[in-house]
Image (cartoon, rainbow, N blue to C red):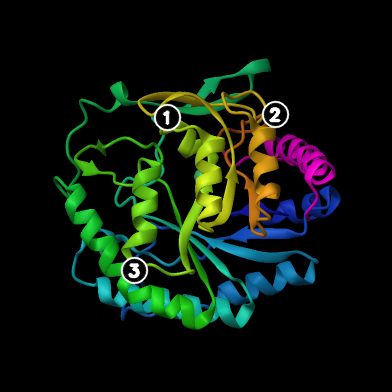
């Protein structure tokens, strides 16, 4: 397994020296915020992305995964303009190929995306974590997009995969879909489809390809109510885990809170050992972290200090797993 850290927000580049100090030499980076519209004309300027990659390489850190690709909102909703979005996404695959970045993590949550109804729940020692309580949003009105059905989302996903899997294969880029988070059937009328291990498996079967797989987000899969180590084994056996998110929660899909990485409901060492038992050679990164002492809660889940704790914990588990099982 290859340990990586995420650099998504302005200011995250400050983590580069920290990453060097921690001995983490892989990065997960994005192309843009998903809310950013396509520039007029439907094209995309990849020059800033290329120079970002170059700056990481100069610091001795290799970008391994693009998480947060070019916008796919119209594609997810099946709106006009989706073919232009797909064209830009395929161009991204070509650019990634030229930069030797071999995995792209995308999701199928239009409009609302990653969502928490609470962002500063008090955790141990006054750290804060995020959480979701479905009751908080039950009374909320529909969005401007009205009701979006599960059937529409599946059809749109299949349309997308039919178009991009051949390009992914051509460029040697693995498509790693992220499960929906929170994994509830709908929020404000926008359905969610990737809310169970069965649904994730179905994605890999829509277009069968060694380039069509998943991001194994332990926190999301735990919130689905699934047995995380068992599900991990199943997807590892199918060779469908292309990227892993290391995170834990307490609770259920309808009512959960995130935790420090060793304080949730999942056997994290058992999970780490399984990655090595199956000989997976993909990136794993700390997913959302608590906001800690002296930090503003301005980037809930993505502040810096929690990453230090997570990386130390993960390195310990990885060393133990390597000694027990072998692998790299
Ligand atoms: Mn995740």
Q: Nearer the viewer, residue 163 or 131?
A: 163
Task: Identify which residue is drawn at 18% across, 70% down.
Answer: 80
Kindly identify which residue carries mark 3.
Answer: 161
Quadrant for the N terminus, please.
bottom right
313 w.r.t. 265: above or below: below
For disc 1, the neighbor class at 10 Å (few under 14, some 14 to 19, many from 20) is some
The percent position of residue 210, horizontal first and vertical second, equals 49, 69
Q: Nearer the viewer, residue 143 or 4?
A: 4
* Callout 1: SS: loop
Residue 217 seen anywhere in this rendered image of the structure: no
For residue 70, the mark is none
Task: Identify which residue is drawn at 31% across, 73% down.
Answer: 162
Task: Confirm whether the magenta stretch covers residue 158.
Answer: no
Kindly identify which residue carries mark 1.
Answer: 225
Q: How far separated are the C-alphas under marks 3 and 1?
A: 27 Å
Q: Quadrant of residue 306?
A: top right
Kindly identify which residue carries mark 2.
Answer: 294
* Callout 3: SS: helix
Q: Is residue 137 left or right of residue 249?
A: left
Q: Is residue 271 left or right of residue 67?
A: right
The mark that comes first in sequence, 1 or 2, is 1
Dominant SS of magenta comes to helix
The percent position of residue 19, horizontal first and vertical second, equals 78, 52
Would the CB of label 1 be found within 8 Å of ligand 1? no
Q: How far separated are the C-alphas under marks 1 and 2?
A: 34 Å
The mark that comes first in sequence, 3 or 1, is 3
Q: Is residue 308 left or right of residue 266?
A: right
For disc 3, the neighbor class at 10 Å (few under 14, some 14 to 19, many from 20) is many
Q: Which residues are magenta?
A: 300-327
* Callout 2: SS: loop
């Amino acid at each position: 397994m290859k340990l990586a850290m995420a650099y998504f927000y302005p200011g995250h580049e400050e983590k580069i020296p920290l990453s060097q100090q921690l001995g983490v030499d892989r990065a997960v980076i994005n192309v843009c915020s998903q809310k950013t519209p396509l520039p007029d004309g439907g094209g995309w300027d990849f020059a800033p992305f290329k120079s970002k990659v170059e700056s990481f390489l100069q610091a001795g850190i290799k970008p391994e995964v693009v998480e947060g690709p070019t916008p796919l909102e119209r594609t997810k909703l099946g709106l006009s303009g989706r073919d232009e979005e797909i064209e830009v996404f395929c161009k991204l695959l070509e650019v990634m190929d030229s930069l030797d970045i071999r995995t792209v993590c995308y999701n199928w949550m239009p409009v609302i995306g990653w969502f928490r109804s609470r962002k500063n729940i008090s955790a141990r020692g006054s750290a804060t974590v995020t959480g979701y309580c479905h009751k908080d949003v039950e009374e909320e009105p529909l969005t401007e997009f009205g009701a979006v059905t599960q059937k529409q989302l599946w059809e749109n996903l299949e349309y997308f995969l039919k178009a991009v899997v051949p390009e992914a294969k051509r460029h040697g880029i693995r498509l790693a879909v992220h499960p929906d988070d929170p994994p509830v059937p709908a929020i404000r009328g926008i359905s969610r489809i990737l809310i169970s291990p069965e649904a994730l498996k179905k994605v890999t079967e829509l277009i069968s390809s060694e380039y069509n797989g998943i991001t194994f987000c332990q926190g999301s899969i735990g919130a689905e109510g699934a047995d995380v180590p068992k599900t991990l084994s199943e997807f590892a056996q199918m060779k469908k885990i292309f990227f892993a998110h290391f995170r834990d929660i307490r609770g259920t899909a309808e009512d959960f809170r995130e935790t420090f990485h060793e304080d949730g409901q999942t056997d994290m060492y058992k999970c780490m050992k399984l990655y090595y038992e199956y000989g997976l050679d993909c990136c794993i990164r700390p997913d959302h972290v608590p906001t800690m002492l002296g930090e503003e809660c301005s980037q809930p889940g993505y502040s810096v200090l929690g990453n230090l704790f997570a990386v130390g914990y993960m390195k310990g588990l990885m060393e133990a797993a390597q000694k027990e099982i072998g692998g790299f």
